[in-house]
Amino acid sequence: MIRKRVERVVLAACVLGALTGPGVAAEIENDYPTDARVDYVFGCMAANGQTSEALQRCSCSLDALASILPYDKYVQASTILSMRQGIGQRTNAFNATKTFDDKVADLRRAQAEAEIRCFRG
C-alpha cells in the first residue's frame, strides 16, 4: 500500500517535471493549469502504458493539444462529451446541438494532430 503511494508520488513528480521542462512553449500552452495537465497525462498513460516512453509521448501530446486548442475550449468540449454520456432530456440537448458538435469536432481534430505529432512520429 505504501509502495503504491510512493510510486504515485514519484510518477506525479516525473509528470510535473516533464510538463514544466524546457520543451514547453510557455507563452502559448501555459493556459492549461497544472492539475489539468497532470490529469490528462495520467489518463493518457493509463491508456498507453505506465512507461517513461508513454510519459514522454503523453506529455508531448498535451503540449501539442494545448498549442492548438485554448484551455477554455478544451474544457467546453470535455464537458459536452461528459454530458453526452448520461441519459435523459439534458443528454439529448447536448447530443442535438450543432454548436456543441462543432466544439467537440475542434477537440477531436486537435487530439488527432497531437497523436500524429507524438505517437506516430
Image (cartoon, rainbow, N blue to C red):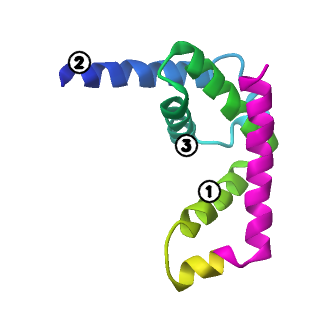
Q: Would you call the spot at circle 1 few (<14 residues within 10 Å), some (14-19), or many (20 or more)?
A: some
* Image location of residue 36, percent across then percent down: 55, 43
* Image location of residue 101, percent across then percent down: 76, 67
Residue type of the residue flagged with mark 3: Ala
- Viewer-proximal residue, 56 or 28? 56
Residue type of the residue flagged with mark 2: Arg
Q: Mark 3 points at which residue?
A: 36
- Identify the secondary structure beneath mark 3: helix
What span is colored magenta in the figure? 95-121
Q: Does the magenta portion include 31?
A: no
Residue type of the residue flagged with mark 1: Ser
Taking 44 as reference, is 12 above or below it? Answer: above
Q: Name the residue under label 2.
A: 3
- Identify the secondary structure beneath mark 2: helix
The number of discs equals: 3
- Identify the secondary structure beneath mark 1: helix
- Direction left: furthest residue: 1
Q: Mark 1 points at which residue?
A: 78
- Viewer-proximal residue, 11 or 111? 111
Q: Residue at x 67, y 34 (%)?
A: 62
* Image location of residue 79, percent across then percent down: 59, 62
